[in-house]
Image: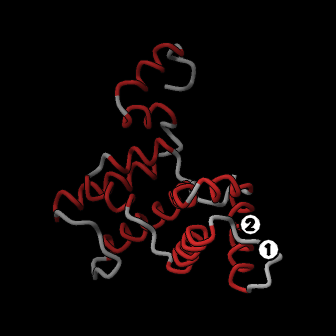
Amino acid sequence: LCQGRLSSTRLRQLREISPLVACRVEAPYADTAFRVKCDQLSTLIKLNSWLPMTTSTNVHEKSLACWLTKQRHLLFQDRLSSPRLQQLRIISPLVAERLEAPRASPAWQIKCDQLSAFIESSSRLPKRNSANASEKSLAMWLAKQKQQLSQGRLSTARLQQLRGISPLAAHRVE
């Protein structure tokens, strides 16, 4: 499709049909392995009515569970392309829910909660030069989040969570 046989207008029309068609038009050959895994995942879910589990004794199911976990990690690292994300979401509502489930990161969440509490109680951001060790720690953590954002390593979900704390935090990070 992308080897010059179709006009750009026709390619655009094909992309607009559905996310699945768009995925196949964008990279018809490069994503073959990805599509095969998606098809296998879809088949397994239709047969069993559940997502594959890493604890399964079935090697194929365990392999698909690991692959789906990897796709989720790529999503949280903002390294999963939109067409691939769309292709995964349309496999099953179970897959869509799994992809969107909050990532378990207790340490990060604790810092976020501490920052929120600090801003709420003091109506300001924590300072790096504070004599209070916990305030200084929060200030350094917030600076690290800004650094990760500038390096493209802060996930969209985490950025949105920081933005939701307060306009002060949003302004500092961005």
Q: Looking at the rendering, which quadrant does residue 96 occupy?
A: bottom left
The residue that appears at 32% across and 82% down in the rendered structure is 55
Q: In this figure, which residue is indicated by the disc labeled 1?
A: 128
Residue closer to the observer: 141 or 127: 127
Side of 49 where 53 appears, left or right: right
What residue is shown at x 27% (from left), y 54% (from top)? Answer: 42
Residue 159 picture quarter: bottom right
Q: Amino acid at mark 2?
A: Ala
Q: Position of residue 5 (x, y in %)?
A: 52, 17
- In the image, 143 versus 169, the foreground residue is 169
Q: Determine the secondary structure under disc 1.
A: loop
- Tag 1: residue type? Arg
Find disc 2 in the rendering and name its residue.
Answer: 143
Q: How crowded is the residue under tag 2: few (<14 C-alpha within 10 Å), some, or many (20+)?
A: some
Left or right of 152, for residue 25:
left
Residue at 50% from the left image edge and 40% from the top image edge: 29
Tell me, yes or no, whether the two marked residues, 1 and 2, touch with CB atoms within 8 Å: yes
Q: Residue 156 at what x, y percent from top left?
A: 55, 54
- Nearest to the observer: residue 66 or residue 126: 126
Q: Residue at x 46, y 46 (%)?
A: 84
Q: Which mark is residue 90?
A: none
**Picture coordinates of residue 112 (x, y %)?**
56, 71
Up-down: is 3 above or below 99? above
Q: Residues within 10 Å of mark 1 (few under 14, many from 20)?
A: some
